[in-house]
Every structure is written in structure tokens, then in C-alpha cells.
Amino acid sequence: MVSINKTSLSLMLMSFFGTAYGRPNIIIMQPDDLPFLEPWTPPPNIPSNPTDTHPFPNNDGNGLPHIDSLRLNGLQMMQAYTASPVCGTSRYSTITGKMPSRAASVRGLATPNSNDPAVVTIPTTKLEDSDEQKDCSEENLAQAFSGAGYRTGMFGKWHLTNFPDADYTYASATSTVQGCGFDTVKALYIENLQEEGGFNSYSDGTFSHNIEWMVYEAIGFINETSSAGEEFFMYFNPTVPHSSNDVEVAIKDFTCTDVADPNYAWDSDPWIKGMSEDAGCAAYRDTIVARADSSADLGKIWLDDAVGALLEALNDAGVLEDTIFLFQEDHGMDSKGALYEGGIRIPQFIHYPNGIAPGTFDGLVSTVDIAATMMDYAGIVQPYNLDGKSWKDAIGNISEEDYWKNERCLFFEVEQDRAVRCGCYKYLDIHANGSKTFQRGRTGGMSNSIGGNLFDLCNNAGNYVTAMQNNREDTTVSDGDAEDELVAALQCHLDATDPDSNPDYSVCGSIPPTVTTPTASPPTPTTSQPTESPPVASPVTPPTTSPSIPTTSPPTESPPTASPVCEDAPIAGIVQRNTRTCTWILNNNRCSRVKFSSHCQATCGTCNTCRDSRLRFDYQGSRIQCSSVTTAMCSDDDIAKTCPETCGTCW
């Protein structure tokens, strides 16, 4: 018998009915180009650099205590992904909950009537409106939360607006971002600090990275909203440790008062608890240098101090326990810009003391899921179509987590390359040999065939492989059934995001099970509670296997052979590496899908049509399907019942 303590029970109830503390505040934090550090369980290294490591900085023996407190005291997503592996495209997916190819800017730039995928890059993917689609003025998280009565604030790097050089002023940039749903926009960096060709985020050289400025303004926003009793949504995007403008130069040669806003006036250095306190900014920055063993440590330590200062401010304002603090990378760094695991897998931690118990979640999640999930926790009915799905009700639900891990499909996009992962299998479709994915594959020692590459990312137990020197994308695997399924899912995605067609938000790939969960607005408990088990199809009782015996004459010594009847397949089905019994299929509401109902026709009530099982199954040490069953094998009663069409044993 499973024992549930009071804390677990209260968190289960909060997940169902919403917290007892009101709507949560939301912070989404995305550092820029932060490596996937070893304690966070990154994907395997690229084959060309198999022993590369990204450890925590020493930081006086403390590592990254504040960022890691979000992980250890929150929920760690063990298989989190970005929808696209570069800064701007990833940020679009986070702030909208939509795939980057759906951006109005991408659709507007697409070549009409082309059979090629739309081009997903930083320059093409912006949060801007078109006549048909209102990404900035309607369809994003800030607008959704603002419309629901939240105060909204944005601090740090934006990267989601095209600004002609001649039109830029800091005030005009701030006004543009505010137009996308943010009440407060401060410490804004509209673009990267340094790009190829010398562009420097409209800087005249008087400012660089300045984490203290961002934190100072964010704390002011926390204090202002909390003291007014208002809930807030904050989008917080540090510019470090991105190599645009050297972080070491920023720390040593600039000060906290060197900012991008030319009209910003400081009376003194900002006083920030846990960062620049009484001793001032220069003394604080000296401590960063003293705690770093190398220049690569500087940005990480600076970031960790920033997280600590924000946590201190939330605690001092009395809102720490009821604030969702989501921390994630914008993309991977080992294969940045490419659709290999080193480019799309990211660390993601969610700290929410009043709503999420510490632990891990092994399902596949994406940056496109953030919008749906945050709206779900806030009780906001989704005001526009999303690609993402809320994982709120999957936390602590074993069968739901199993679906998210083994059957859910995620999609990935950059340039004109596309990829899909469903369970253990991943299919990478490289469009042309000039793409960043093609080039990263070639230099990194990974399979980069033009067209399709099928990978198996799991070990024999069906678990995602993270061993440093066991890259699963160096060679392809052969599995016709898996490839067919993933190719069909990817084609569905391409059709749904085709810029020549109306957007289609139907689910591609595995259809999620039906569960009885509350809608986006948490229900008010009543005397009638939802049932604990979701409704399932009523199984049809199969006909009796006993023959009728005539009453007018005694039976012969050899009774007549029983006619075939509708039965479940007696052999357990295999989905990827997971055994699926008819009891599991029934209890997890998979009967609506033909590949499952064909295996369990009696249980699923589909006896009106005789079908072979569509699932694979084990037979004498081999994994086969009915399509490979021979006449001789049909003499095995279990095979005959599993493959009645092939064996001629239809009822």
C-alpha cells in the first residue's frame, strides 16, 4: 500500500483545484548561451569531442548554490527541449507557446506555393504582427497574463523585434516591447551586444553586460507589485554568459552604472542584497573575479548571484512560496544552431513551493509547453491556439508521465531542417547540405545524410542515454515501423505549419490519452467531485467458446470444433520498448487508436471488424509483426489469435 504524507496530499489537491494561496506569480528566466553543466545530466558529447566537460565553477567551494536550489527544491525536467536551437527562435517558442515556423514574420517571408519548409532563423522569427496574425499585440504570454489582470515586466535581452539602425532609440525600443504586452520594460537589450560585422546592440561603447542593472530593476518590479497586492508575470533574460562583448571585460572595465539607457541617472551604485551591497559595485565585481578559477566561470557565478538576489527579494516581499520560478537555457551549446541533441536539449527547473513538490519528471517537454502550463497554473483560459501542452496535471500521475515519456512527439525546427522525437526514436530531416545542422553533423561526427536519419536515443531498458561518450546520433538505426510512424508525424507537422495554408493546431503523432482533469480555470470544489478514474470504453463480452449441444441427440464422441471468436491478442504488444497489455491499454484510454484496439478487440469493443494486431510482439526470441507471420507460424494458437486476418481465423 502506498503511503501519502500530508505534504504530498496537499500538493496533489493544489494540482487539481489550484493553490489555496491565490494565483501564482511567474518568473521565466533564460540566460544567454549558458552551457549544459554536468550535474544537470546533459546529453552525450558530440563524437568529435567525447571527453568535453562542463563542471560547476568552484566559487569558493559552493558551485552554483542558488541556481541549484531551484533544481533541488523544485522540479527538474529530465528530458526538456527547446523547439529551435538558436536564441531568437527559442525565445519565440517560449513567449508564445507556438513553433517558430508559425511566426507571422516567418509566414510572411515564405516563398508562396513552395514545397519547401519555411525558413526559421533569428532574422525571420520575430514577435511582430501581420494582417492575419497578431503575435505582438495578442498572441503571447505577456498579453495573456496582462489580459488576466497580472502586472507584466520584461528585463534583459529581447531579440524578437527587427529594428532598422536609423530608427533605433532606447525609448523607441522600450515602447515597442511594451506594445507586446509588458507594462514595465527596463534594463533592455534589444539585440545581442556584439554581432559579426561590428554591430553592438546600438551601443556607443559606453555599456556592456550589466547583470546588476537587470536585477535592480527586476527587484523594484517585485517590490512594487507585491506591496500593491498584485500578481506579476516577469520575463527575465540575462545577456551572459553569451560571448557577445567579453564577460571578463564587462566585469573589469565597466561598472554597474554603465547602462544602455542614455537617460538613466544614478545617485549611487545600486544596493542589491546578495550582490552589490554597502561596499559598492566595484568591490562586488572583484569578488566575482576572486571566486572564478577561469574566465569561463565568471558569467556562471554572476548569473548564480543574480538568482540568489531575486530569491532574496521574493522572500523579503513575502511571495517566494507562491512564485513559479522557471529557469532554463535558451538552447544547447555543444551543437548550437543544429537539431542534434547537443543543440536542442536544455536544462529546465521549476521552483514553486506552494504548488510543486521537489522531484524529477521524465516526460518529453518543450519550450512550447511553457505558455500552456503557466496559463494552466494561473487559471487562464488559453486566449489563442498553442502548439504546447500543459504538463501541470501530469506531475505525480504515473500513467500520464509514462505517456509523456514513451509516446508523446516533439518537433524541432531551424532553417529548413526539421526533426521529430516520439518516445525513444528521433527522425532528423536535413533539407540541404548548406545548413548548420548538416555542418555540425559533419564536423561533430554525427550522421548527417540529406533527408532522413533515424536515431534511437535510449538503451535497452527504454531510458534516455546520457553517458558522456555514448552519442546516439553518430549512426542511424533501422526500424521500418518506427521510421514510418515518425515520418508520418513529421509530415503532419509540416502540413500543419505550411505557410500557404491556414494554421492547423491538431496534434501530430501520438494522440494524448483522455483524462478527467480540470479546465484551465481551476474549478471550485462542490459536493460532487470528479471521479478518480477516467471514463473508458465498455468492453464487449466475447461470445462463449463453448459450442451449442443439440438437445435432440446426444453429442458425438468428438465435439465439433469451436468457431473462431473475437478475442484479445494473448501475446503482449510492444510499443517501442514497452510491453503493453490489454489492461494497460484499457486503463490508459488507448482504445481510440487503431494500433491499440486492433490488439485488444474484445476489450476495446471493436469486434465488428476482424483485424490483425498492428503492434509488434515477441515470438521465439524475435520481435515481429503480423506482416511477417508465415502459414506455419499460424499453427501456434497465440499467433492465430493475434493475427486472425493473416492466419484466416477471423470470427
Image (cartoon, grey):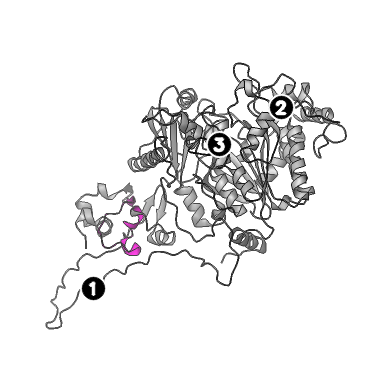
Give how far across and how far down residue 319 sits, in percent. Answer: 74, 51
- Marks 2 and 1 sit apart, C-alpha to C-alpha, by 81 Å
Quick check: marks 3 and 2 in contact, CB under 8 Å?
no
Q: Main secondary structure of the magenta part?
A: loop
Give how far across and how far down residue 454 sits, in percent. Answer: 40, 36
At 75% from the left and 52% from the top, the residue drawn is 229
For marks 2 and 1, the one nearer the N-term is 2
Query: Residue 629, relative to residue 344: is it above or below?
Result: below
- Near mark 3 (Cα within 10 A), the count class, few <14, some 14-19 or many ≥20, is many
Q: What amino acid does circle 1 point to?
A: Ser
Pointer 3 residue: 92
Of badges 3 and 2, the one in the foreground is 3
- Marks 3 and 1 sit apart, C-alpha to C-alpha, by 63 Å
Pointer 2 residue: 209
Pointer 1 residue: 546
In the image, taking residue 99 as reference, residue 158 lies left or right, namely right
In the rendered image, which quarter is residue 174 located in? top right
The number of numbered discs placed on residues in the rendered structure image is 3
Give how far across and how far down residue 509 sits, in percent. Answer: 41, 46
Quick check: marks 2 and 1 in contact, CB under 8 Å?
no
Query: Residue 598, relative to residue 267: is it above or below?
Result: below
Query: What's the magenta region?
Result: 595-618
* Label 2: element kind: loop
